[in-house]
Amino acid sequence: MSQELDNLVKSGRILSEVREFVRTMPIQDKPVLEVCEDVERKIRDFGANPAFPCNVGINDITAHYTSPYDDQSVIPANSLVKIDFGVELEGFITDSAIAISLNPMYDSMIVAAETALNEALAAVAPGRKLSEIGTVVERCIQRYGFRPIRNLTGHKIERYTIHAGKSIPNVSGMETGRFEVGEVYAIEPFVTTRDAEGAVNDGDAAYIFRFVREKGARSRAAAELLQYIHSNYKTLPFASRWIFKNWKEGDVQSAFEELTAKRCIVGYPVLVEASGKVVAQAEHTLVVTNDGCRVLTR
């Protein structure tokens, strides 16, 4: 475990540096594509890889939005922006997110998300039920006059696996698992307005994908592209724009469409707050210790 912890600590240190870069980044009126690529480039500059494509969620767009290769959208004034990113180093993953307010009316939502995160981290202990963290998060968010997103959760992390089976809810519930020493988790409260639905729906588009299976591609181009995807990203999520930018062998559009049709790769739909209300987010990665937890990304 000591070598694993060393690698996790290194991954977390890199992510912490990138967090500070993101926190001070001027983003108003900036192309979303540029934000995504700047964050991903910064991770690579530290000698690591993005654990997944940089997510930029504007207002009610809550998760899983990364720019397609031809994205023309920009970050508008008066918006609430979530930037979610991860670092992968030798397969060891840390994950974090911050929210940036371009309108003072959203500042208190960010405070609620960050306070809920800090209270949740303080409540982690070996043997404690994961569901108890959901209670902590929900009560904190409600204390600030907001609602949590009930169908998004934190998640256990393992080597080369971002979502490793156990979830940490953001509301009180019946999650039966418990924390165990040495496990790695990302806790990520999502906060929306009191009058919101408090849930997310799948959008129509997907720009983030993951490898599922080796067999199924019929054309040579699709089979070669699938091998490229598996070799470069293994089981980790990747952006469609990475493929369209880097793959130079033939008709990438038709090969990519074949792989999705055959479910050799599957997409993560963009998630949108069900009632169209704005959402804030905060996230850190931790490792469970004998006396609580160690935050790796702070």
Image (spheres, rainbow, N blue to C red):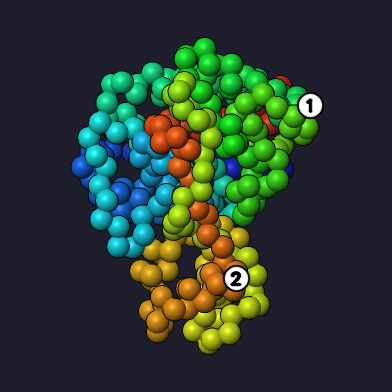
In whole angstroms, how far apart are the C-alphas of marks 2 and 1?
Answer: 38 Å
- Give the mark, 2 or 1, whose residue is nearer the N terminus: 1
| Residue located farthest toward the bottom when viewing the structure as drawn | 220
Residue 183 appears left or right of 28:
right
Q: Residue 48: x, y in percent?
A: 47, 53
Q: Is residue 247 visible?
A: yes
- Nearer to us in this view, 122 or 149: 149
Identify residue for label 1. Answer: 127
Q: Residue 33: x, y in percent?
A: 30, 53
Quarter location, residue 135: top right
Q: Residue 62: x, y in percent?
A: 45, 40
Quarter location, residue 103: top left
Q: Amino acid at mark 2?
A: Cys
Query: Residue at point 70% right, 45% down?
Result: 165
Query: Residue at point 68% right, 31% down?
Result: 288
- Nearer to us in this view, 140 or 84: 140
- Nearer to us in this view, 285 or 296: 285
Disc sitting over residue 207 in the figure:
none
In the image, residue 228 sits, relative to residue 90, either above or below, namely below
Q: Few, some or many C-alpha atoms within 10 Å of disc 1 (few <14, some 14-19, many ≥20)?
A: few
Q: Few, some or many C-alpha atoms within 10 Å of disc 2 (few <14, some 14-19, many ≥20)?
A: many
Query: Residue at point 41% right, 36% down?
Result: 276
Single out the mark in the foreground, 2 or 1. Answer: 2
Identify residue for label 2. Answer: 264
Q: Locate the N terminus by quadrant.
A: top right
